[in-house]
Each structure stands twice: as C-alpha cells, then as structure tokens.
C-alpha cells in the first residue's frame, strides 16, 4: 500500500457567465506516491496540475474519485480531521513572497504552526525545534529569524516555508512550482534540499512545467495534458523512451544549452522508432502540433455547454440520466458530491448548469496501457 | 551598428540614497543581432532595458549616452523620446498577455496607438492584417476584445502591435519566463522570424534563463550587480565562458537527461551585494571561488579574444588581452589551449 493513493480523481469547475457552464479539468487521474519518493507532475498551464495539488491538500473539493492517505479516504474529511491530516501533508507554493504577510515578520509562519499544533511548547523547547528545522533546510537562524519577508531572498523565503512544513511530522510535501520564480543560482539549492529531504523519507509531489527540473529530481514522472494523464512511470523510462507523441513534443521543445531547437527535432525519431504505434508521426509534425497546443491551450480542456449535453431537449423533455456511474475500477461518485445545486436565480434566468454527474459520465478518458513494466501510456487518437 | 551604449549610468532615487542599478555599461548591437541580456534578479538588466525606452519617475539618468542608428537617443528627455517610442524603439512587455486595453477592441486600440505616434492608421492597416495572418491569427481579431482571445493569441497580438512600425530596436523583457516550454519555443521562434523578415532590425531579449537565450540569441551579455561581466557570442558563452560567474550560472542549470544521483548541481552561494553602496573592486569577489588579492581592484571590461569581452582579473591572467596588432598564429593557439584548461578546471 502506498502512502498516498490517488484514485480516479475528477474535478469540475463552474465557468462561463453566471456559472452556466461546467468545465472538466481533471479526468480520472490515478497514481501513487510512496514514502521517500519524488513524483513530478508535469504539464502546461491549464493542464490541471495545480488543481490536483490543491485537491490533495484539500484546498479544493474533488468532484469524483478518492484520495487515500495511509489507507484512509480523506476526500470527505471535515475540519477537525483535516487538522490531523495537515500534520502529515503540507504544501509550498510558487510565489514565496505572497505566502507571507508583508506586515509581519517572516518567522510568524512558525508561530502560527505553534498555536495550532504545539500549544504546550514554549520558550527554549520551541526555539530548539525551530533551529533544528532551519538546520535541515540549511538556513542560519541568525540570518532569517526576526526579519521581514522583503529582507530575505526568494530562496531563503522558500526554504523557510519548507522548514515550517518540517516542524510538523510531515510525510508528504506538495511542492507547486516552488522554484520557477527563483533565480538559476538559488533554485539549485532548493532542488538539492528536496533531494536531501527525500533521502530522509519524505514523499514529494513536485509540480512543474519545466521538464529538466522534473527529470533532475524525480523518481516517477506523471505527464498531464488537458486534465488527463498521457504518460507516467519511472522517470528514466518516460524521458529515455517517451511513447506518447505529446511527451515527445514536450521534450523537443525544452530549451537546452547545447542543442538548438531546430536540431532537437532529430530526437523524436529515436523515440518513435521504439514504438511502432506512433511511427507515422514526422518530427516536423510533432513540432507543429506542439506549437498549436501551446497557442490554443483552451482547445484541450473539454468544455461542456448546455447545448452539447442536452441535445435531446429539442426532441422531447428527456432528462440526462443521473444514475450514471463511472465504469472501471475505483469507487463511484459519492452522492453528496454528485450535484452542484443550481441557484434559484440561475434557473429563473435560464442559466442552470448541466449536471455534474452528466459531465463526469460524458468523460470518455480511457485507462492507461502498460507498455513496459512501470511505464504507462495513454492510447492515442488516430491522427 | 544599430545601437551603441556608452558608459550608461542609471540609478533609482530612494530615501536612503541612490541605488546604482546600472553602473557604467557600454556595449553595441549590430544590425540583425539578437542580444540576450542575462543575470540574476536585481542585477540591473531590466533597468537597462527599460531605460532605453521609458525612464520611470524614480529612475535617474546619471551619465552616458545612447546612440541608435547613428543618432543620439535622448533617453533622459521624456518628451523627446516620444518621437522614438514604438517607431525606433519598441518593447514587448513582461506580461504581454495583460498589456492590452480591456475596454477597446484590438483594432481600435491599435488605431489609437498608431495615431498617437503621428502615423496614419489606414496606411499600416494592410500590413497589420498581413502580419496578423503571418502569426496564424484570424483577421477578425481586430474586431475582438482582448478577453475573447486566449493567452497565446494575446501574446502574439501584442508582439505584432509592438513591431508594427518596424522599430530598429525591440526590447523583450522576460517575455518567455512565465510560459511553459512549448509556448516558450513558439514565442522564441516568432522573435527570430520577425528579425529574419526585417520587421525588427535588432533585439535585446532580457531573461534570467540562459537556456532560452542559447536558442534564440546571437550574442549574450551577462550582467552582475549593475556591471557587465561578460559578452560573447551565445555559443562561446555556453561552451567556453571565461568569467567565473557565467561558469557558475551555467553550472547551476539542470538539463534534460541529468539526474541528481548522477551529477548533483551546485548553486552559487551568497547573494549579490547591495547596490546602495556597492563594494569596491570586483563585485563578484565575495562569492567567487577564485578570488585573489588583485580582485580588490575593479577589473576592466576588455576584449580577451576576438568578440569575447570579460571583466575578470583571473580570466585576464590566463588569456592576455587581444592587442590591436594581429597576434601571431602560435600565440592564438596557446591562448586557446590555456582557456580550455581554465574552463575545465
């Protein structure tokens, strides 16, 4: 049993004028994170990677599926249970500066942990705890304590937030783009710190859009596109022998010091040759598609308008079937999460949203196929 | 020679004194050159870029001159600069996606912008539509509001509008930093195409990401703490950097295929010095592993090899500066070998 098991997690956001549309942003995402394992979650903006991080941290409710932490489903836990959950699972986010209140000193974040989790610790005991946490993130207490956030560098701020997580008995750290705002010179320090923590047994979900960072640090890689996993598995297998054309196009687009983009196209055939399924895909086409994908990210997320979900309404007063259950492994929808209730005013003005269950049922994401041990890939559509 | 910057000094007025963000910077950009400007945050690279088009109220022009296409560019004079903005010097802002006026249709906004530059919008409309086609957008974006376009479409629209009057110099400040890899590539390739088609004579691309510059830039200028550290062609900077700072900056970049258990990367310890009262001598001295006595003196920015300028005493010791008279064959070979040993160590 893995430490964290994500099973068929789906998420629907309400979008459009007056929330009249539902948008499926995560489609039956399943993977595991073990103790002492770094899993990098890679995807473009809009692929749903940050949403998944928020769902794991329960900052956002999930629409379908379940999240098991050490064998217990935490997706319906209430506030008091979540307090125990946060003792073990913590998050660090992209912009370190906005994680602090600029009016207070930066070490206030420690104090807030104390009031909630360690109300009995005082004075020297607490100070020792802070010092050992700071030591494990390689910060000198004199440099960072009693300072305002703007007096610290981005790397120091980010490490201070990691130290805050380490005060608790944290087992899983959700690191959402934590180094993309740091300079090249300081981001390596934070990266290497994550490697150290991983060696001490911390599980890390490393969310990033930068493939080279993901490859550097992670044991397992999950590649997300339009809310669905396209490829996942051991990092060396996914990067060394990418099977899905999307993964291949991502790899060719990574800017590298010693190889130009034009020359990088030559990389695709090697990966393609290993797998007959995508053999027809010319490198130029891969590059073209990657550019199209980049410029029209909205085209990827499935968007459900009323008209696409209620085609039968013109013929007769048929209602979509609410009892639809997601097929395949994993538990079905929990009844309490099945419907987002329409507001009365929305119904009056004709803005009633299509039902959540119908959106989830219309999701035809196929399960991944195991192409080699420990390497899963999504079935590609015909071009 | 499109742009020539000579000993430019820009400082920020603060309550505690002047912060010397750009401190005696000289360089030039050839026609058709894309120059990358790299460095850590706070090294003055954005200040340098901004000063060439729009000097904010709190920025002060302390000294130095800028020459564009052989004529002086009055960067300190807000009104005189108006004549040059968009026409001679143009900028793609950092958040190009949110740079468009949300209450105007794209066409109307562009028309206002072009008219404010004293040019007839109808004369450029045909060309505008042609370029909209070129970047793969439908022509009816002119009749759309910015919120009707996706982020990528807005980015492209901004780039077309910025370059509509064929400026001599385009400044792109961190235009690829917030983007994911595929969009980064699309934007980078668009920049190169604009240059190749002559929409823009030369460009300064400001970013902290050296790997993007290695893709699109012809030359790279590395800044540290308000001063120039190194300038060379992008291939030379990536493969044979001479300044220790550049070497460490490149050493700290992870590449695809590199893993922590095979080759752990090292960062650069320490922080850049405060520019309020910058230290004397080499500003990288405190963080430099090779620092020695001579570094207490400020190193000059000299050409050590053809087209390769460095400000570092150590590099200068290992590579004697290029003399005005042509060096003999043997001397240049020995220079080359000693340099390659230097970079390996």
Image (spheres, coloured by chain):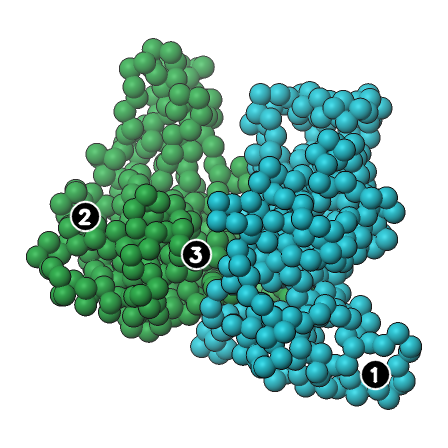
Helix, strand or loop under label 3: helix
Residue at the top extreme, as displayed:
A348
In the foreground, B180 or A121: A121
Q: Where is residue B312 in the image (x, y as percent from the top left)?
A: 66, 74
User: Visible in this render: residue B334?
Assistant: yes
Residue identified by numbered label 3: A154
Name the quadrant containing residue A58.
top left
Residue identified by numbered label 2: A82
Name the quadrant containing residue A155.
bottom left
Q: Where is residue A49 in the image (x, y as percent from the top left)?
A: 42, 49
Q: Which chain is green?
A: A
Q: 10 Å neighbourhood of mark 1: few (<14), some, or many (≥20)? A: some
Helix, strand or loop under label 2: helix
Q: Where is residue A298 in the image (x, y as percent from the top left)?
A: 53, 37
Residue visible at 52% across and 63% down?
Answer: B272
Left of A40 or right of it: where is B191?
A: right
Q: Which of marks 2 and 3 is nearer the N terminus?
A: 2
In the foreground, A375 or A153: A153
User: Visible in this render: residue A285?
Assistant: no
Helix, strand or loop under label 1: helix
Q: Where is residue A362 in the image (x, y as percent from the top left)?
A: 41, 35
Chain holding disc 1: B
In the foreground, B122 or A247: B122
Q: Distance between the residues labelled 2 and 3?
A: 29 Å
């Amino acid at each position: 049993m893995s430490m964290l098991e994500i099973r068929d997690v789906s998420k629907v956001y309400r979008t459009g004028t007056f929330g009249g549309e539902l948008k499926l942003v995560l489609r039956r995402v399943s993977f595991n994170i073990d103790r002492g394992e770094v899993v990098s979650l890679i995807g473009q903006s809009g692929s749903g990677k940050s949403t998944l991080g928020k769902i794991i941290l329960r900052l956002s409710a999930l629409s379908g599926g379940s999240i098991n932490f050490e064998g217990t489903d935490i997706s319906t836990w209430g506030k008091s249970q979540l307090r125990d959950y946060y003792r073990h699972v913590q998050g660090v986010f992209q912009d370190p500066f906005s994680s602090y209140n600029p009016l207070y000193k930066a070490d206030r974040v420690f104090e807030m942990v104390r009031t909630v989790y360690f109300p009995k610790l005082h004075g020297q005991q607490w100070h020792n705890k802070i010092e050992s946490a700071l030591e494990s993130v390689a910060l000198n207490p004199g440099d960072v304590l009693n300072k305002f956030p703007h007096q610290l560098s981005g790397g120091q701020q980010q490490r201070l937030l990691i130290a805050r997580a380490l005060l608790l008995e944290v087992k899983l750290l959700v690191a959402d783009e934590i180094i993309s705002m740091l300079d090249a010179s300081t981001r390596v320090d934070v990266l290497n710190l994550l490697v150290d923590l991983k060696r001490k047994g911390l599980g890390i979900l490393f969310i990033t859009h930068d493939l080279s960072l993901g490859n550097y640090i992670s044991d397992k890689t999950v590649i997300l596109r339009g809310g669905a996993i396209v490829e996942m598995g051991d990092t060396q297998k996914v990067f060394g022998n990418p099977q899905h054309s999307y993964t291949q196009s991502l790899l060719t687009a990574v800017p590298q010091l010693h190889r130009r983009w034009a020359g990088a196209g030559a990389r695709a055939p090697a990966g393609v040759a290993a797998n007959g399924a995508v053999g027809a895909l010319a490198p130029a086409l891969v590059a073209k598609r990657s550019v199209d994908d980049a410029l029209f990210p909205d085209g990827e997320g499935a968007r459900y308008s009323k008209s696409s979900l209620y085609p039968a309404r013109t013929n007769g007063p048929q209602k979509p079937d609410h009892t639809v259950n997601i097929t395949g492994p994993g538990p079905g929808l929990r009844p309490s999460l099945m419907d987002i209730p329409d507001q009365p005013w929305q119904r009056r003005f004709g803005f009633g949203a299509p039902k959540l269950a119908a959106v989830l049922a219309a999701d035809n994401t196929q399960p991944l196929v195991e192409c080699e041990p420990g390497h899963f890939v999504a079935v590609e559509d015909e071009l | 020679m499109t742009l020539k910057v000579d000993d430019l000094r820009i400082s920020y007025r603060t309550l505690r004194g002047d912060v010397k963000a750009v401190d005696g910077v000289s360089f030039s950009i050839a026609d058709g050159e894309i120059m990358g400007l790299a460095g850590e945050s706070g090294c003055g690279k954005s200040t340098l870029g901004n000063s060439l088009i729009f000097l904010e109220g709190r920025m002060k022009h302390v000294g130095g001159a800028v020459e564009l296409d052989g004529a002086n560019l009055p960067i300190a004079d807000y009104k005189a600069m108006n004549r040059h903005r968009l026409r001679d010097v143009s900028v793609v802002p950092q958040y190009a996606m949110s740079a468009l006026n949300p209450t105007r249709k794209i066409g109307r906004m562009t028309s206002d912008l072009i008219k404010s530059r004293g040019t007839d919008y109808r004369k450029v409309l045909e060309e505008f539509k042609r370029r909209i086609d070129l970047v793969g957008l439908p022509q009816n974006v002119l009749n759309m509001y910015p919120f009707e376009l996706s982020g990528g479409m807005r980015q492209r629209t901004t780039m077309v509008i910025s370059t509509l009057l064929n400026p001599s110099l385009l400044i792109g400040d961190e235009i690829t930093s917030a983007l994911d890899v595929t969009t980064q590539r699309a934007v980078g390739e668009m920049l190169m195409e604009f240059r190749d088609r002559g929409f823009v004579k030369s460009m300064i691309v400001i970013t902290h990401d050296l790997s993007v510059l290695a893709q699109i830039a012809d030359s790279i200028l590395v800044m540290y703490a308000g001063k120039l550290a190194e300038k060379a062609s992008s291939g030379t900077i990536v493969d044979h950097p001479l300044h220790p700072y550049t070497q460490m900056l490149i050493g700290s970049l992870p590449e695809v295929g590199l893993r922590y258990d095979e080759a752990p990367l090292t960062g650069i310890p320490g922080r850049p010095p405060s520019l309020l009262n910058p230290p004397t001598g080499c500003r990288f001295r405190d963080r430099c592993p090779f620092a020695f006595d001579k570094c207490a003196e400020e190193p000059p920015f000299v050409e050590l090899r053809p087209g390769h300028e460095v400000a570092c005493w150590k590099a200068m010791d290992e590579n004697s500066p290029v003399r005005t008279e042509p060096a003999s064959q043997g001397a240049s070979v020995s220079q080359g070998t000693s340099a390659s040993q230097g970079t390996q160590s």
